[in-house]
Image (cartoon, coloured by chain):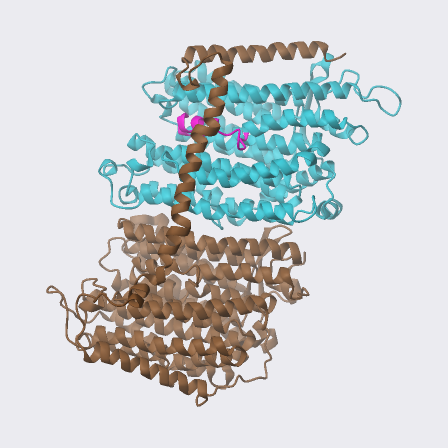
């Protein structure tokens, strides 16, 4: 097999040649903090922040170097070492797609590191928290920078591990421990798909590297569709898409910065990355796999939005929203290079505005004794203005308020979808209306209306170490969309990496029928929310609600389904297998041995002395037999 | 031609065992540790002198033993045997350090000295069994290994130790007996071979594996006979490994053995089974092996899934770990019989990596059990709060057990599965299905490990573990090298694969598998 670096014709020099530092720095940080233990308690958080910022600096320098190159040369291979000889050469691929992710991960990641200094300041194990955050950043960077599927998979499971550790950070809470385990196991169902996808890929094309696949002739046939669907299963696990969505809501057991970084801005978007990265090979426009990705995305964007409508827990509301927004990205990723560009665009803007809102929610919880029930909030605007304003900016961005960032990227996905598949497209419009409703509900319940606080709540604004990251993120939430989408900037930047035509500008029609319908539906959603949660008083205990409310509150019965389909039958199967093993196989053997030994009882009851004689007699017999056979052996 | 490395490697621990036996009690442990470290150092020097891609068997030693029957004291290693001797040499000092106080248990019938002398005797035999190139000698080591292990379980083990030790012995003897018959049968066959000049090829017959393999290029074994002989070897190895349904002795033995002995039992002794399949079953009886492959693959896949499911339901940590190993042995056997370069390299690497991963898991579980005095998962909870280092070691070992990418066991499991899926040895399709079904184990592995972790380490701290001490300095020394190996080979498996690769190619050439990888790699390197 050829070295991918040779295929690409260059092994990168300059900063890009050192891009492995992006992974190494936070990895070393994690190692120092974990091995150093309590000795590093004093400065552990600072080291964590420094390592993350260091990675960010490397990413920025790499971007600068890429920008200095001709667009066709912006695909730089960094060969590292032979991993599995003959099968996998470990290397990094620094191109427009991976560097965009690297900037998001290290940029938003560093802000969240800084925020956590304040948020976790009262936790005695803050150092361990930063160790896990660093571990996460390193793994996530490996995921997006690896130049082959095995490297991607190592990062993929690495972020899964970090997610497990951080969801279960407060491991002494049984609910957190269970949620962590659930997240890992559900993700492993997806990993099964990714693994088998690699088996088929290797057997069919004899390569697992992106460069190798780029050189292969890939015809769309049953096998290729199968690879696409298997990868999609992996993507569904990591990105909490139907039918593997159930872990994400429980994952909110983790500290809020974790929810912001891992379960909103970065890790959960890895599935979208996987689909886009594999897009040219396994999800081309019009392929079956791409169609299924679109269906999954559409179903999830609606399901997440419906769940979001009924949650009173602010973090779970945001988690439903995350599911839904990733559904949009997955939908976008179904429609070829233009779709990829909008999907990645939405992924980046979402990374900012959702991290902004999650951290905002954390700031609110910080002020309200870790209360998460929005029915016990209300009227917080005047008490914490910075948090409220930045949160509201994020809110306006997500509902697609004109000219804010979500407006551009979400509209792009909707328009592209309507062009290729009107049914999915219009369902996405409906989803936007729901988004308008549930996000407004959250805003009204939290920041406006009458205060419904518990007696001992004394809300206050958070310290600057927490509010400054909020402000920076909200600036991104305002302007990034316009920057990325107008003039087709992101599309043209990504085009060489994802197989698009570079001299093309994707159309953007704010005043088209879909564009205006979206705005109208969002407005309807906002207005309904205002009547129900702004104008009317919010009851402190949740009303029983209709069948539909219950349906949404119970996460569309996803857990009930998993329990009755997998968990309970699994438990029965396990018990049966253990019983069979003890009584069936072992019982049979013991019974046989006892019968041969001339005892009617079980071997368990045989006197040790007797059994030893028995064993020795077999040994003696063996020796005798050996002798006899040796004597006659030469006949 | 004759090298004294391997006889030395066997002699050092034998001498060590005798010295420990007569030395004063206070020096016994240190002498044992020193001896095992000498063996480790010798092994490392040997490994660096080994030339991958050179002569297949290196460090060859041959001396007549029973000339009348062509029995020789024949030793030599290829890449496969070398890495397994390496595994043995690395694990033994670690296990000795971990077992420092295991023999102090009040119920032990024999002295502390005896326990450590037994460990060195076992070390000699484990090296011998992998180094033997004479099949009769292999058989002798194969059986002799049982004796020290029998006493280590039976005299120093848990409450049910007698039952477990006897069960272990009976199973192994039964398998050994079948193998003995097959060994002798093979010997009889070799006496009948006639060379090109009309003279008998081996006047007194032979047990020398390299000679038999060479002769098989011109000679044949009658296919009916070959099947019987194959069965004799295979069943012995399937009991040793063990494969389902021959497995029920292992959970008992592993649960009752002291943790250190359990590591050597599951980490090394059981590998003799899968090693034997790869070395002897396949190369001596290639046609019979192919004939039996469908059955073996089915047994392996059943073992992978069944072992994992039964592991989930265990209430005793050590039994749970034993069942996970049964699942892992299924992977190894599947890789061996998938008959592709990648799968067999993966299977060999799996034997090594499993030793490290499961070794660490058993030892960490042993540390927990030694503190709390109970092997039952339900007796724990919230250990992470009181003993974070111990909890961390247990957790990482668990991650290696579920083959987390980045840890060594992932590489081998991935190679076994992808090599099985892509094997063209039996046409496409059937093996692909086996690989897909086996991949379901990645989900089950997450369940059995993480559920155990949740119940032991997480949750509120149980009353009974609240005073638990964290790892001592000695215990850190036990854990650290394993951790380094698991992570190191997780990212850099190449040094091991470079040693293993030519040996696997040689094996596949002798098995005459119609596999493009063999033609390509055999010609290329």
Q: In the drawing, does residue B411 fall left or right of residue A8? A: left
Q: Quadrant of the N terminus of chain A?
A: bottom right
Q: Residue furthest bottom?
A: A511
Q: In the drawing, does residue A162 fall left or right of residue A207? A: left
Q: Is residue A484 above or below residue B69?
A: below
Q: Position of residue A343 (x, y in %)?
A: 48, 73
> Chain B rendered in what hue?
cyan
Q: Position of residue A279 (x, y in %)?
A: 56, 68
Q: Position of residue A261 (x, y in %)?
A: 36, 65
> Chain A rendered in what hue?
brown
Magenta-colored stretch includes residue B248:
yes
Q: In the drawing, does residue B171 fall left or right of residue B108? A: right
Q: Is residue A306 above or below residue B416?
A: below
**Magenta residues (range):** B241-259
Q: Residue furthest right?
A: B197
Q: Quadrant of the C terminus of chain A?
A: top right
């Amino acid at each position: 097999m050829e070295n991918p670096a040779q295929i690409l014709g260059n092994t990168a020099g300059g900063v890009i040649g050192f891009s492995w530092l992006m992974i190494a720095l936070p990895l070393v940080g994690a190692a120092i903090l974990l091995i150093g233990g309590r000795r590093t308690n004093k400065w552990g958080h600072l080291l964590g922040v420094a390592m993350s910022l260091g990675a960010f600096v490397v990413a920025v320098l790499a971007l600068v170097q890429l920008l200095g190159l001709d667009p066709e040369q912006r695909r730089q291979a960094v060969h590292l070492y032979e991993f599995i000889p003959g099968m996998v050469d470990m290397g990094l691929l620094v191109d427009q797609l991976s560097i965009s992710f690297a900037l998001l991960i290290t940029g938003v990641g560093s802000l969240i590191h800084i925020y956590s200094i304040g948020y976790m300041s009262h936790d005695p194990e803050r150092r361990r928290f930063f160790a896990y955050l660093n571990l996460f950043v390193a793994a996530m960077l490996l995921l997006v920078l690896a130049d082959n599927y095995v490297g991607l998979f190592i990062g993929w499971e690495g972020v899964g591990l970090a997610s497990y550790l951080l969801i279960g950070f407060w491991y002494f809470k049984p609910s957190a421990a269970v949620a962590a385990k659930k997240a890992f196991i559900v993700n492993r169902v997806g990993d099964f798909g990714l693994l088998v996808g690699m088996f088929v890929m290797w057997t069919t094309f004899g390569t697992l590297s992106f460069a190798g696949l780029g050189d292969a002739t890939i015809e769309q046939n049953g096998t290729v569709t199968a690879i696409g669907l298997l990868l999609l299963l992996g993507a569904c696990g990591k990105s909490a898409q139907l039918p593997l969505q159930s872990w994400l809501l429980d994952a909110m057991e983790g500290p809020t910065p974790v929810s912001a970084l891992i379960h909103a801005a970065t890790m959960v978007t890895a599935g979208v990355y996987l689909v886009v990265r594999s897009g040219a090979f396994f999800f081309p426009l019009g392929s079956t796999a791409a169609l299924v990705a679109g269906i999954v995305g559409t179903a999830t964007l609606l399901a997440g939005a419906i769940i979001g409508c009924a949650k009173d827990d602010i973090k779970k509301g945001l988690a439903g929203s995350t599911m839904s927004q990733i559904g949009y990205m997955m939908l976008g990723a179904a429609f070829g290079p233009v779709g990829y560009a909008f999907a990645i665009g939405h992924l980046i803007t979402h990374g900012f505005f959702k991290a902004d809102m999650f951290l905002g929610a954390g700031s609110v919880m910080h002020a309200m004794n870790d209360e998460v029930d929005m029915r016990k909030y209300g009227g917080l605007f005047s008490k914490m203005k910075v948090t409220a304003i930045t949160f509201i900016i994020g809110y306006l961005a997500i509902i697609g308020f004109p000219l804010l960032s979500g407006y551009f990227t979400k509209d792009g996905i909707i328009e592209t979808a309507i062009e290729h598949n009107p049914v999915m497209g219009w369902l996405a419009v409906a989803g936007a209306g729901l988004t308008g409703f549930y996000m407004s509900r959250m805003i009204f319940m939290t920041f406006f209306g009458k205060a419904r606080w518990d007696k001992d709540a004394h809300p206050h604004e958070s310290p600057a170490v927490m509010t400054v990251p909020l402000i920076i993120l909200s600036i991104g939430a305002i302007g990034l969309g316009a920057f990325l989408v107008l003039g087709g900037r992101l599309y043209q930047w990504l085009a060489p990496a994802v197989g698009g035509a570079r001299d093309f500008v994707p159309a953007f029609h704010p005043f088209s029928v879909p564009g205006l319908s979206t705005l109208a539906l969002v407005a309807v959603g906002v207005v309904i929310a205002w009547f129900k949660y702004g104008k009317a008083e919010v009851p402190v205990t949740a009303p029983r609600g209709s069948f539909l409310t219950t349906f949404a509150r119970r996460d569309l019965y996803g857990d009930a389904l998993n329990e009755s389909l997998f968990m309970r039958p699994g438990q029965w199967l396990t018990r049966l297998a253990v019983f069979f093993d003890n009584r069936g196989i072992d019982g049979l053997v013991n019974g046989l041995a006892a019968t041969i030994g001339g005892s009617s009882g079980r071997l368990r009851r045989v006197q040790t002395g007797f059994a030893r004689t028995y064993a020795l007699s077999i040994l003696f017999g063996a020796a005798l037999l050996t002798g006899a056979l040796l004597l006659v052996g030469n006949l | 031609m004759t090298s004294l490395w391997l006889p030395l490697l066997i002699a050092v621990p034998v001498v060590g065992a005798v010295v420990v036996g007569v030395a004063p009690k206070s020096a016994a442990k240190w002498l044992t540790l020193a001896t095992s470290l000498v063996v480790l150092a010798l092994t490392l020097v040997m490994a660096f002198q080994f030339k991958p891609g050179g002569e297949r068997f290196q460090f060859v030693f041959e001396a007549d033993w029973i000339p009348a029957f062509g029995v020789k004291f024949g030793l030599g290693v290829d890449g496969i045997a070398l890495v397994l001797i390496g595994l043995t040499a690395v694990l033994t000092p670690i296990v000795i350090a971990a077992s420092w106080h295991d023999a102090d248990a009040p119920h032990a019938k024999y002295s502390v000295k005896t326990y450590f002398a037994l460990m060195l005797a076992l070390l000699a035999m484990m090296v011998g069994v992998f180094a033997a190139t004479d099949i009769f000698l292999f058989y002798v080591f194969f059986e002799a290994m049982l004796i020290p292990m029998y006493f280590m379980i039976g005299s120093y083990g848990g409450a049910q130790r007698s039952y477990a030790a006897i069960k272990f012995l009976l199973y192994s003897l039964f398998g050994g007996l079948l193998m003995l018959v097959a060994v002798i049968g093979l010997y009889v066959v070799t006496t009948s071979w006639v060379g090109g000049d009309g003279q008998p090829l081996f006047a007194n017959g032979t047990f020398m594996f390299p000679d038999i393999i060479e002769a098989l290029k011109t000679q044949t074994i009658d296919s009916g006979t070959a099947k019987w002989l194959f069965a004799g070897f295979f069943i012995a190895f399937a009991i040793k490994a063990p494969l389902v349904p021959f497995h029920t002795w292992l959970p008992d033995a592993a649960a009752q053995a002291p943790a250190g002995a359990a590591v050597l039992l599951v980490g090394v002794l059981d590998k003799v089974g899968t090693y034997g399949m790869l070395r002897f079953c396949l190369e001596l009886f290639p046609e019979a092996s192919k004939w039996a492959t469908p059955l073996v693959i089915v047994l392996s896949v059943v073992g992978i899934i069944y072992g994992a499911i039964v592991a989930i339901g265990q209430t005793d940590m050590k039994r749970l770990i034993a069942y996970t190993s049964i699942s892992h042995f299924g992977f190894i056997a599947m890789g061996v019989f998938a008959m592709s370069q990648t799968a067999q390299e993966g299977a060999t690497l799996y034997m090594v990596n499993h030793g490290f991963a499961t070794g660490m898991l058993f030892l960490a579980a042993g540390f927990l059990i030694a503190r709390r005095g109970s092997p039952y998962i339900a007796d724990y909870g919230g250990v992470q709060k009181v003993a974070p280092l111990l909890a961390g070691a247990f957790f990482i070992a668990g991650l290696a057990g579920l083959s987390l990418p980045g840890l060594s066991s992932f590489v081998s499991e991935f190679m076994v599965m992808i090599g099985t899926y892509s094997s063209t040895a039996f046409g496409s399709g059937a093996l692909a299905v086996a690989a897909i079904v086996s991949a379901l184990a990645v989900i089950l592995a997450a369940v059995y490990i993480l559920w155990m972790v949740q119940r032991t380490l997480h949750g509120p701290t149980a009353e009974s573990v609240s005073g638990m001490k964290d790892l001592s300095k000695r215990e850190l020394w036990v854990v650290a090298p394993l951790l380094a190996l698991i992570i190191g080979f997780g990212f850099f498996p190449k040094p091991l694969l470079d040693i293993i690769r030519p040996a696997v190619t040689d094996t596949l050439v002798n098995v005459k598998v119609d596999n493009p990888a063999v033609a390509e790699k055999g010609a290329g390197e």
